[in-house]
Amino acid sequence: MKAIDASKLQQMVIGAYKYLEENKSLVDELNVFPVPDGDTGTNMNMTMKSGVDKVNQTSGLSVEEIAKALSQGTLMGARGNSGVILSQLVRGMSKALKGKDEIGAVEVRDTFKNAAKTAYRAVMQPTEGTILTVARKMAEKAEEAFDEAKDLDDYLMEIITEGQIALDNTPKQLPVLKEAGVVDSGGQGLIFLLRGALNALNGDIDRDIDLSSNENVEEGSYKIKFELLIKEDEFENISDSIDSLSTNFDYEFDDGHLKAEARSEHPQQIISKLLVDGTLAKLEIENTNPDLEVSKVKGENLKKYGFISVSRGEGFDEILKSMNIDKIISGGQTMNPSTEDIYKNIEEVNAENIIIFPNNKNIIMSSKQACELTDKNAMVLETRSIPETFTAMLEFDEDKDIEENIENMAESIEDMHTVEVSISIRDTSVNNIEIKKDDYIGILDGDIVATRSNIEETAKQAIKNAIDEDDDISLVTIYYGEKADKRRAKDLVKKLSKEFKDIDVELVYGGQPVYYYQATLE
């Protein structure tokens, strides 16, 4: 096989998704922490599903169209850090296939190279021994093994084999993986996707899926024509941005002058990019479907600040509502909201400035990606737990600008300690602590510090560890979850209050799943 056409690429995309879907639980189980919140496989699978849905809505006349649709779908459907990184890998693929009708060896090489490069750029502090390493090693192999005359299935097999070797080596690069006896979950998800794609390349086309129908093709209702004066070194960035926000993007670029046409459901996003990144010389907008109800940003009665918070738990939701949070997105462990979920909530908040609280380290990247897609002034405060939002909101000052508020709120949670108590789903060893299946785990600031057969004893030990490490703690707030016993929770508070007489210990209903207790120490 010397070339891959659009219909075959579409089948490979579907094959990749199906293979990951069949194996997503295996990826979920690779989480280092043996708590029942494994979500890497689920996040990557749902991200890929959004891409497949978009691909199946395109006419699929060229590999460029397939790759662009996949990129748009995964960008908006990205869930969790693994999903965001996957969307960036696909974005790199889309850039490599721009203007291509089919894929040969050159395009395969460029796809792996651009995918790894784009994903690395998206992560502020890349860590080796992760999905990024697997992607980079495959890109290097694609370069090393390149031969324009090589059969594509053989070429891809060499590249994916190198990826498997890189995945197997991830425990040697990250000690935490070695101790837990697992490989990187994101890297494993990527290998499953590529295996599925290769299987589809060598197999028959799935006749259950119409690869040529134009009935579901979606085009933006607004036709936008513009001319922009822009510097040479800024051209690639803005063209990528416009491409990701539109369909049928067509342009000419000559000596700092960009002439372009595109279609989009949200022209205000594109206009915002143009005004920020260059000098707008000409702009025409035509609504080709005037009967469509268009969501517009209300210009009247804009309040100065709006807030969006991710939350999971009845008690937590009620506290956030009492703090005048505008939008509460249901999500958290095991249920990360997508980039599109967050983006839609941003669009619905009628405020000049919007602050987003992801409340989970695995939702920070998708929150930032949503901010990049909107033309509103939205910023992310990198909260890693819901109680951090409570503390941050107490520091908020409406008279200050958003940058200063973000800085002050970040400082207010910088010295907070967080304790979480869950149950182990397997035997393992983490931080030299031997953990047995069905025992309880106490996690302090992201590290497992205690394990017991009793929930409250586990919570008490983890909280004591935090107090022993920090002499300045004066307040402990314990949030009990939906499966915690209120009577036992009250008893835990009494024991802690008796042992630490100089520290105030409070009990609040959080109603959160997965974690029997969450506690903050300030």
Image: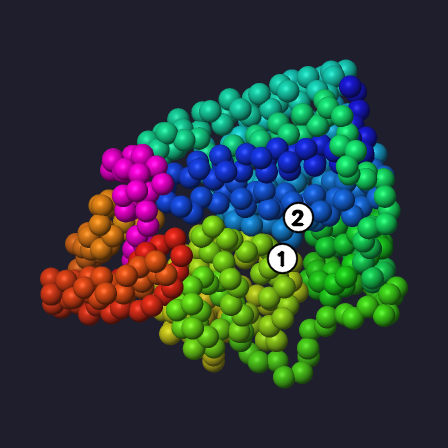
Residue positioned 58% across, 31% down in the render? 192
Considering the numbered disc 2 on the image, is that residue within a helix, a strand or a loop? helix
Q: How far across and down, in percent of the image, does residue 475 sit?
A: 23, 67
Residue picked out by circle 1: 340
- The reply to whether dot 1 and dot 2 touch (C-beta < 8 Å) is yes
User: Could you give the CA–CA distance between mark 1 and mark 2, rounded to whole angstroms?
Assistant: 10 Å
Counting residues from the N terminus, which is met first, the one under dot 1 or under dot 2? 2
Residue 64 image offset from top left, x and y in percent: 79, 39
Query: Which of the labelled discs sits on residue 439, or is there none?
Result: none
| Residue depicted at x 77% and y 37% | 208
Judged from the image, the secondary structure of the residue bearing numbered disc 1 is: helix
Question: Which residue is painted at 73% across and 66% down in the image?
Answer: 268
Stretch in magenta: 416-441
In this view, the residue in front, 507 or 5, is 507
Residue type at the position of mark 2: Ser
Circle 1 or circle 2, nearest the eye: 2
| Residue 451 shown left or right of residue 30 in the figure | left
Give residue 255's position: percent from left, percent from top. 81, 48
Is residue 435 part of the magenta span, yes or no?
A: yes
Look at mark 2 in the image and give the residue it sits on: 50
- The picture quadrant where one finds residue 490 is bottom left
Left or right of 209, for residue 469: left
Examine the rendering and report whether any part of residue 190 can be seen: no
Frontmost residue, 202 versus 119 = 202
Please say whether residue 12 is one of the residues in the magenta stretch: no
**Residue drawn 61% across the image and 33% down it:** 19
Q: Is residue 354 above or below residue 172?
A: below
Across and down, in percent, residue 139 comes to: 61, 28
